[in-house]
Image: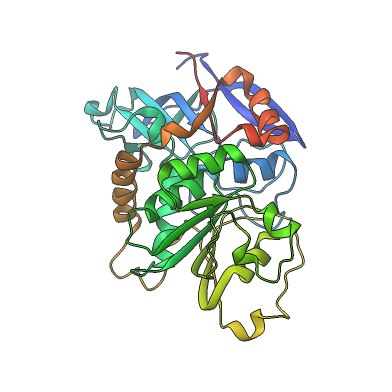
Amino acid sequence: MGDVKRRTVYFTAPRQVELREEPMPALGADDVLVETTCSAISAGTEMLVYQNRFPRDVETDSVISSLRGAFEYPLAYGYACVGVIRETGKHVDKSWRDKVVFSFQPHTSHFVAKTDSLFPIPESISQEAACFLPNMETAVNLVQDAAPILGERVLVLGQGIVGLLVSALLKEFPLEALIASDRFELRRKASLAIGVDDSFDPVQLNEEDSSEPSQKHQSGYTQKFDLTFELTGSPSALNDAIAMTAFSGRIVIGSWYGDKRASIDLGGAFHRSRIKIISSQVSTIAPELRGRWDKARRFTVAWEALGRIQPQRWITHRFPIDDAADAYRLLDENPQETIQVVFHYPQ
């Protein structure tokens, strides 16, 4: 590859992003070279890195080899790259050349990888839609961990991309009610377009007497929920989840709070409520499913869901990779204007 350079986004300090040129890794006999066409920002996790709110005692990812390491600056991060294979090592079948693939890679113009870490993108899935694969796998995992039951009343707190994907999957279930919530009007409108029964502003819960918070949203729906998802990224939202979940209900937490803290009210009604609080994270599969499910099976379900749901409709902003700093500034300062932000790479 000679003197070819690649351009990679680095978080270099709190609220500082640089696009760095760096040498291309050598192409080994078992490797392929991928030229990135687009990559999606995972706003929840990446804003923790951008805002210096990541924990210092965990790996960036314990499963994805390209992301292993410590959370410390400077850091190349991201995990939703789509690109085209341009070169193949001498031991790689030449049929891989020109395939469009997905990979869990930081935001970079080129990367070298083994074929067993790549996901060929089905022809029915657009490249932009394929950028949503990690978040769709997360949404599938959340729904599997929650195990919705026929006729349940379900609440989804948070309508960012993961929340919208969860809502879209739940819409396929025969539920009694599916209610969503988000503080941003743009995202509430997106969830209503999915077909949820109502999508309300959580500020309403805090502006009025909160003794009966399940009665405060605009739909007038007065019963508490059998199943609640906490996907806001805000730990204080767990209090809303507890208040709105029925006796012996389930709360599935998919948010990663980083170093954010909040006072959680476990001393009131929760003490006698028998509510189950479930931690759900996509890196592993729930023990009760592992005898029948593996990552490959879950990815198959995620690809099929991408084809049905077409999440690229929620891309609100597209930035050339040269303007990466502007993209993160937008997400930091004006998140109410965004749903999904995607980078494009000039070819």
Identity of the residue drawn at 61% across and 17% down:
322
- Residue 160, position as x, y percentages in the image: 55, 44
Judged left or right of residue 291, residue 26 is right
Identity of the residue drawn at 68% across and 45% down:
48
Query: Compared to 215, does 203 lie above or below?
Result: above
The image quadrant of residue 170 is: bottom left
- Residue 272, position as x, y percentages in the image: 62, 86
Quadrant occupied by the N terminus: top left
Identity of the residue drawn at 59% across and 82% down:
273
- Residue 191, position as x, y percentages in the image: 48, 45
User: Can residue 285 be seen?
Assistant: no
Q: Nearer the viewer, residue 115 or 154?
A: 154
Query: Compared to 96, does 320 lie above or below?
Result: above
Q: Nearer the viewer, residue 273 or 162?
A: 273
Figure label count: 0
The image quadrant of residue 142 is: bottom left
Q: Nearer the viewer, residue 72 or 197?
A: 197
Residue reaching furthest to the bottom: 272
Query: Compared to 282, does 126 lie above or below?
Result: above
User: Can residue 148 be seen?
Assistant: yes
